[in-house]
Amino acid sequence: MFQSWPSAISGGWFRPDHGLLCRVTRLVPPDVRLCQSWAEAVSEFGAEVMHGSGLWDFDPLDVSESGCAEVVAHLRGRGDPSVPLPDGIVHSDYFWIADDPGFVGYLALRHALTPSLLEEGGHIGFSVRPSRRRQGHASRALALALPRAAELGLERVLLTADEDNKASRRTIERNGGIYEDSRKGKRRYWIDVA
């Protein structure tokens, strides 16, 4: 049975050289209250692919408040297994990575794999807006998503990264990703969650 969206999933961090930092990375359901910072992030991404966003149905993407509300409703509906989806699309929990200032990035947790996702997409996709990269948000967001994957009954999750994307590879490896192989220019990693 489909359960309601979890409230925010949070994780702070401690660095010996800085003490406890005040920013806390959270995974939150898409929320129109983050519209302004989300719209700014969309602009920052420019033509870059926003992995984990679930926004492929929105072309052009309307970043107004009403457009954001449409995106939020669409993404929240994708996680409900009682809602039929088009062929080739799997149910997914879409999260927005956030911290105190607002929207940081995207994370999608797919409930199952299609043959295509097994080759190239995996269970989890994520991206962080350019101005917020190299701050640990992706690593913390992925760590926060793994218990949700276990709640979905997944024993392990597949993640992929472009061969030349060292940052994503490090993020996956820091979270226990074990390299399996490369296919079509994508490195494939498995993380045990059970």
Image (tube, rainbow, N blue to C red):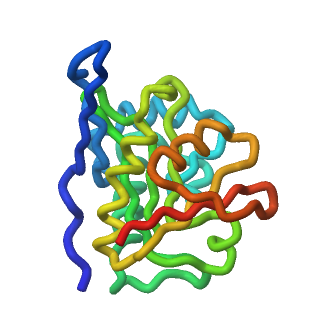
Could you say which is closer to the camera, residue 94 or residue 172? 172
User: x%, y% of residue 52?
Assistant: 51, 54
Q: Which residue lies furthest to the right in this view?
A: 184
Residue 127 in the image: above or below residue 36: below
Q: Quadrant of residue 6?
A: bottom left
Name the residue located 41 percent from the left edge and 70 percent from the top edge: 78
User: x%, y% of residue 15?
Assistant: 30, 22
Name the residue located 24 percent from the left edge and 86 percent from the top edge: 1
Q: Is residue 113 left or right of residue 22?
A: right
Could you say which is closer to the camera, residue 94 or residue 126? 126
Name the residue located 79 percent from the left edge and 55 percent from the top edge: 185
Q: Quadrant of residue 25?
A: top left
Q: In this view, does 5 lie to the left or right of 175?
A: left
Name the residue located 45 percent from the left edge and 50 percent from the top edge: 175
Which quarter shows the C terminus? bottom left
Residue 63 in the image: above or below residue 69: above
Q: Quadrant of residue 193?
A: bottom left
Could you say which is closer to the camera, residue 138 or residue 41? 138
